[in-house]
Amino acid sequence: MFLLLFWLATGLGDTPDWAFGRSLLNEGKWAEASQFYESILAKNPQELHATMMLGIIDLNLGHYPAAIDAFQAAIDGQFLVFVNRLNLAKAQALAGQKKAALATLETWVQAGIGDFSKLESDPSLANLQSEPEWSGLLDLAQRTATPCAFNPQKQVFSAFQGNWQVFDGFGNLFAHSSFSPALGSCVWVETFSAHYAKTEWTIYWSADDQGKVFQAWFTDKGRQGRMVGESDQPWRFMETRANAKGEDQCNCMEVSTNPDDSLLMISFLGEGPCSSKSTFKETGRMIYRRDPSGSQEKTK
């Protein structure tokens, strides 16, 4: 209390010390924290940060109507709208305003930038889980968080997910690879580690909304490239490069899987004219087999 009185008496409050206010909250000193933020609002009634913090205090003290008013004021003033919309939903749920809370949560989820994984474990929202709209809200959250997972056309590379052993064309194990989804399952990230050259590649695989145009971006020791394809299996990717004469040539590879997706083959077809109908001669291949151990440890 002495520090708070000193802060108020010395006029240091002309510039709010938000860290000091936060420390009061962290220590559970609700009365002192409330006095701190109210003093800020007395000097500047439009200070929405203080309004939000008072809402948090009221929420923790069980003053739900006051918390609702505070969070709604912050939203109306366009202050941290996404954060305060979730705060508002919690206050509404705890106040027994279940329909309002569900509507607020739906708007929050539709914004698409939250951590939806904690919806079911948040105790402030527990009383909403028995409502008939709850399952639909969770489905919306999942679809918002991983939009491409619900679009079959965007999932043409989902069969790649997991760990693989990589063999050369002579059957020698020389590398390991791992595929995992990213960006809402819209992109598949491959980490490729080859022991012989201590090479590590990162390759990003994706498809368009029709599942017909594929792209693979890759990085290798600072070099970057992009390969594009427009065909069904085997997927043919081409990376455009200029030859010594300055003419566009394409470095081409084809990717295919077997019926049960336990084997993945990449054929390198060398360089040639940049046309999906061009004839290329295979110059090498890599065969991926599911790693039976699931290990991503490099080959010795």
Image: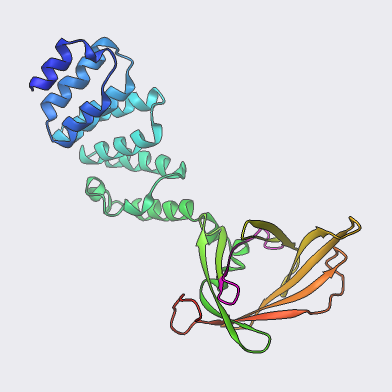
Q: Nearer the viewer, residue 96 or 158?
A: 158
Where is 73 relative to 216, above or below?
above
Which residue sits furthest bottom?
171
Q: Nearer the viewer, residue 270 or 187?
A: 270
Which residue sits furthest left?
2
Residue at 21 percent of width and 40 percent of height: 94
Q: Tell me where the magenta segment starts and ends, as one range.
A: 193-213
Q: Is residue 274 left or right of residue 298?
A: right
Q: Nearer the viewer, residue 298 or 261?
A: 298
Q: Quadrant of residue 187?
A: bottom right
Tell me where residue 166 appears, x and y as whole percent: 58, 80
Q: How many marks?
A: 0
Tell me where residue 218 appears, x and y as whole percent: 64, 61
Q: Quadrant of residue 224?
A: bottom right
Q: Is residue 210 magenta?
A: yes
Residue at 52 percent of width and 54 percent of height: 183
Residue at 38 percent of width and 26 percent of height: 79
Where is 73 relative to 201, above or below?
above
